[in-house]
């Protein structure tokens, strides 16, 4: 197969530079355009010395004509940007992988309410495929437009899905406590993300409603077959990368033996047996974010403390990798019929 020409819109952000890092090791992809309005004209390797020797490109201002010359365009831009440019690219036959939330929700009024703006192309949102390979692999393979899941939604959905698909837990009263490293908020300077404001401290935020809630509930409802109700409280951890989600659900009284610790372990192992990027840890494990740093892996443990009626799932990912850019590359591999693992095989960086 000939080399895939890729463009990245929003190449100076954290997910953009993570895409550059991952694609530099991908044998079948050549990045031919990378955009930034603020850094147009600056060599990529000057802004990111970690990429010296890997890229000979300069940032350019976004230009749809240039993007349309590529086989695939990644949007690593804030919400609202992709939807202005995607219709023309799709009309010209270019494949698009959007890391923002523009095409994630099927319910457009809900999208407009949570994101505080009017949607520019609801008809394309209806056509977009939600890029969670563990659920939608077949549709991803035939898609022209992928809506990459958000970071919290990836960790939380992968943890709850086996239980909901099996009908073992009550669909209401689901709880997700999740903590993210600060890179989840992007590279733009914000006072409440300064080192001095966060280091040696831990806090929740958006406890009364985070925009990932409708996305997570949409995915969980698909897994269950009807509505679910989730309480989701995100937290900010003073680290750079990683999400740790602790999930709680109540077993149905009808679950019986299917809800035993051994049966739950088996359920998760079977559900993800064929998945290259979900690792169900041995019973009793406590997965750590550092075990997935820089990788496309989601590590999961499931437990039933004291044999009571609650199931607890621990799910960890790297927000910039399985939570964004590496999952975007996994989607690209599936879309182009490549080996799904290509460019994504390195283990985590320790310590
Ligand atoms: N950080 C994370 O962990 C995750 C992020 N995401 C999503 O991915 C997207 C990118 O996130 P992240 O990398 O953190 O963001 P950053 O804020 O770090 O970077 C944003 C990038 O977009 C460019 N940009 C901003 N506005 C525009 C515009 N109007 N037109 C074209 N380019 C623009 C910026 O460059 P310039 O302004 O110079 O053009 C910059 O390169 C967001 O939608 C985010 O929600 C998804 C999952 C996880
Ligand atoms: C720590 C932190 O601030 N995290 C971000 C995660 C957002 C993200 O990246 O998700 P989207 O792709 O949906 O924007 C937040 O809570 O807004």
Image: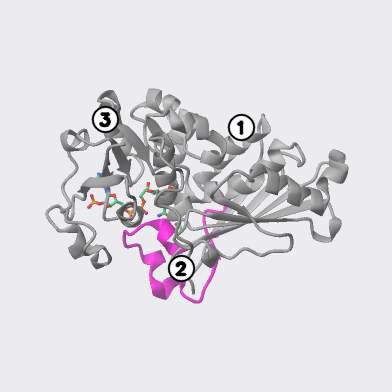
Asked whether residue 180 is in view, the answer is no
Q: Residue at x 21, y 57 (%)?
A: 55
Question: What stretch of residues is rendered in magenta?
Answer: 179-208
**Between 298 and 273, which is closer to the camera in this rendering?**
273
Residue 188 on the magenta span: yes
- 51 with respect to 294 (left or right): left
Q: CA distance from mark 1 to mark 2?
A: 35 Å
C-alpha span from label 3 to label 1: 29 Å
From the image, state whether disc 1 or disc 2 is nearer to you: 2
Question: Which of the 4 image quadrants contains residue 271?
Answer: top right
The residue labelled by disc 3 is 89
Q: Residues within 10 Å of mark 1 (few under 14, many from 20)?
A: some
Label 3 residue SS:
helix
Question: Eyeballing the image, is 265 above or below 117?
Answer: below
For numbered disc 1, what is the local secondary structure?
helix
Pointer 3 or 1: first along the chain: 3
Residue 186 at x, y percent in the picture:
37, 57
**Residue 188 x %, y %:** 31, 59
Q: Identify the residue shown where x is 48% and y is 58%.
A: 318
Q: Nearer the viewer, residue 252 or 205?
A: 252
Q: Which mark is residue 222?
A: 1
Q: Nearer the viewer, residue 146 or 309?
A: 146
| Residue 218, x across and y down, in percent | 57, 35
Residue on which the image places disc 2 = 349
| Picture colour scheme | one colour
């Amino acid at each position: 197969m000939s080399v895939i020409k890729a463009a990245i819109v929003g190449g100076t952000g954290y997910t953009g530079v993570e895409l550059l890092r991952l694609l530099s090791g991908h044998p079948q992809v050549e990045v031919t355009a990378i955009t930034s309005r603020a850094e147009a004209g600056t060599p990529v390797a000057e802004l990111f010395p970690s990429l010296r020797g890997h890229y000979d490109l300069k940032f350019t201002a976004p230009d749809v004509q240039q993007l349309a010359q590529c086989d695939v365009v990644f949007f690593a831009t804030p919400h609202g940007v992709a939807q202005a440019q995607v219709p023309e690219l799709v009309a010209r036959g270019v494949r698009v992988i959007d890391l923002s939330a523009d095409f994630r929700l099927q319910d457009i009024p809900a999208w407009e309410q949570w994101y505080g703006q009017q949607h520019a192309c609801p008809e394309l949102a209806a056509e977009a495929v939600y890029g969670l390979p563990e659920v939608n692999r077949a549709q991803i393979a035939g898609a022209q437009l992928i809506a990459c899941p958000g970071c919290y939604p990836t960790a939380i959905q992968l943890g709850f899905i086996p239980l909901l698909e099996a009908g073992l837990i009550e669909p209401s009263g689901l709880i997700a406590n999740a903590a993210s490293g600060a890179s989840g908020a992007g590279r733009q300077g914000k006072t409440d993300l300064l080192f001095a404001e966060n280091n040696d401290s831990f806090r929740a935020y958006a406890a009364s409603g985070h925009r990932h809630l409708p996305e997570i509930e949409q995915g969980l409802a698909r897994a269950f077959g009807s509505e679910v109700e989730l309480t989701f409280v995100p937290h900010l951890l003073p680290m750079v990368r990683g999400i740790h989600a602790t999930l709680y659900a109540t077993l149905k009284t009808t679950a019986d033996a299917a809800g035993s610790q051994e049966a739950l372990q088996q359920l998760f192992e079977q559900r993800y047996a064929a998945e290259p990027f979900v690792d169900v840890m041995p019973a009793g494990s406590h997965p750590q974010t550092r075990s997935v740093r820089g990788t496309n892996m989601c590590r999961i443990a499931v437990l039933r403390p004291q044999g009571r009626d609650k199931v607890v799932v621990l799910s960890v990912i790297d927000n910039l990798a399985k939570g964004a850019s590496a999952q975007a590359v996994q989607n690209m591999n599936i879309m182009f019929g490549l080996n799904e693992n290509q460019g994504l095989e390195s283990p985590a960086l320790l310590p």
